[in-house]
Amino acid sequence: MVVPVNYYLGLSLALFTLGAIGVLIRRNILIILMCIEMMLNAVNLAFIGFADAFKAVDGQIFVFFVMTVAAAEVAVGLALVIAIYRNRATVYVDDLNILKW
Amino acid sequence: MSLTIPTFSLASIGPWLTLSVAAIAILVWDALSKERPAAVPAVSLAALVIAAVQSLTLLGKKGTDFAGMVYVDGFTALAYLILILGAALTIFLSWRYLEEYGKNLSEYYALLLFATTGMMIMVAGAHLIMIFLGLEVMSIAVYVLAGFLREDLKSNEAAMKYLVLGAFSSAILLFGMALIYGAAGGTLYLNELAKKLAVTKAVTQPLILLGLGLIVVGFGFKVAAVPFHMWTPDVYEGAPTSVTAYMAVAVKAAAVATFLRVLYVSFPGFAADWTWLLWGLAVATMTLGNVVAIAQTNIKRMLAYSSIAHAGYLLVGLVAANQLAAVGILYYLLAYTLMNIGAFAAILLVSRQQDRYLNIYDYCGLGRQHPGLAAAMSVFMFALAGMPPTAGFVGKLYIFAAAVQAGYIWLVILAVMNSLVSVYYYLRITVLMYMRPAEADLGPVSFTPAVTATLAATALAVVLVGIFPGWFYDLAAASVKIFSL
Amino acid sequence: MLLSYLPILIYMVIAAGLVGLIVLLSELLGKKKHFPSKDMPYECGMDPIGDARSRYHVRFYVIAMFFIVFDVEAIFLYPWGVVFKQLGWFGFVEMAIFIFVLVVGLVYVWGKGALEWE
């Protein structure tokens, strides 16, 4: 059974939108980072779906790069969360208010 | 089955190799030596000089290498040189400043070199993976740089905001790339995209437009275009001043150059769709940047809004989409690098120690106390405002002329009106320096050789490049022939 | 097409129904007696010690982050492994350079003392 590319695209759009809404409305930095991961996974799904439909590999290779880069980004993000937590004891973006937001 | 390994020449990516090897060497050297190696800034500068020489050898070339993954041409080489100039000037500003915070660590220089490498990968990328990879190598390094003063709450906060919004915008850009990949029927090469999209256009038009819109939003974040600019003032204010200087010039230059290439190479068939979008972005960006800058009293915040406004002028160039516009953008990036780094050098000197004096009223009476410093700062303010005979004027002239040539009269009228608004807040600094007496004794300015030399050199260069723009114009005009505009 | 998945659906319905039925029956038929040692979390018959939300040392996070970064780079070994034979020595040298860069990262982390536990 072949899953049509539209299904992949629809699911990916839904995931991406959910992630984007999450980034905009959630206040906990860790959850925001998770929402960004979700957006990236939506992108991965879209690439894999298209690569499968076109029988091409370049979309799949792109996914590898997205994954490695996402890992690096999240490592930096968590390091920053730890630094902020040490200095401020908070993980909420509303408390990051020294600079005007 | 056998694979044919494509031929390639390492010289095509010489500058990347030099900078990344230098950065890795610095990291290992630092990790293995007991004391902090003092020669790291010098080594990074040497690496940048070598990379600049390597970029010069690429100037006359044309085409791609590494199986079409990397552009090797004059446009790329000029962008490399501008980025290297920005990085080198930043290093000159950095070490004394970091010393004040006790943070003159080797990692700073390694990250700076990595970020510059990322920018180069991005501007030379002929394939969406390369562009994405370069963008992220640059961004991740700059996130860390923004949070470099680990004990400083402002720096923490700036880095966090930059990371969250940067990662968000990368995700948006990536989704745009994924949609374009799908709409084109499976290619990631920039030049093939244009051909394939022209064929599939009839069927996948909505997907293409959505993807293109997302790509514009993604790049809009990176160049700080309104309404995707919210992070800019906070991050510029909170980040270490030397990093702010670097972000303002190099990150923007890399993003604009890449944006230009993507739009002109991959989406010429959709010019009618993206020009009106960018038209709106350009007007909003210029207007908001200039109007809000008037209300700022922190000089770093003011320059943040000024950098938003300059992003608007650059977008005017992108809208114009002709040869002159591409030349104008390259020239403007050079001019902007020189005048902005110069202004930040002056800010570093005036702020004395550890960013103590960043209010614009701390500039009162500077003209009497330190005439040289005040004169240099005035040159930068005149240049940023776009007054002759500085480089800022010539840059605006090229870009606005290109827009007139392309028939965007209203856009140019709005841009010129914006420039007039900007004169107010730039010249306010000059007025404060010369017309007002000092409000309090802020202590002596310690003129360190590196920062003073940067200040003098950039002030001189801003004027010279403004009076003699011809040589750069010729170089740029030859290099942008690759775009079929 | 989808019809061939019908047995799985039936199986899932039965499984979910059985679980619901058992929970419902024990709720209806069972006795309800509460005493302190019954309300305690079950920990192999031992009395639980302390709060479950104890704080971990930050070193665990650091090690975990190193693990993530180094681990994910292993992704690139898979496509390389698939075409290893065809790539020949060129592919080997390229991957050796890649691994070398990762090792440099490890050397840096080690040299900085981030792996010291004390």
Image: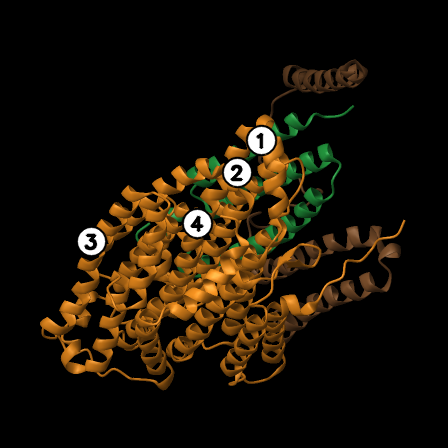
Chain colours: A green, B orange, C brown
Along the viewing direction, whichever of A73 and B251 lies nearer the viewer? B251
Separation of marks 4 and 2 at Cα, in angstroms: 14 Å
Residue at the location (25% across, 82% down)? B445
Tag 1 and tag 2, C-beta contact below 8 Å: yes
Residue B103, horizontal then vertical, whole percent: 44, 75
Q: Nearer the viewer, residue C34 or B147?
A: B147
First-in-chain label (1 vs 3): 1
Vertical position of residue A74 compared to residue B87: above or below: above
Chain of the residue on which disc 3 is drawn: B
Amino acid type, mark 1: Lys
The secondary structure type at the circle numbered 1 is: helix
- The three-letter code of the residue at mark 2 reads Gly
Residue under the image location 81 percent in, 16 percent down: C4
Parent chain of label 1: B
Residue corresponding to mark 3: B421
Name the residue that disc number 4 marks. Answer: B322
Task: Say left or right for B113 vs C78.
Answer: left
Q: Distance between the Cα atoms at labels 1 and 3?
A: 42 Å
Three-letter code for the amino acid on which mark 4 is drawn = Asn
Q: Which residue is mark 2?
A: B269
| Residues tagged by mark 1 and mark 4 found on one chain of the structure | yes
Proximity of marks 4 and 2: CB atoms separated by less than 8 Å: no
Q: Residue at x 58, y 62 (%)?
A: B73
Assign a secondary structure to mark 2: helix
Name the mark nearer the viewer: 1 or 3: 1
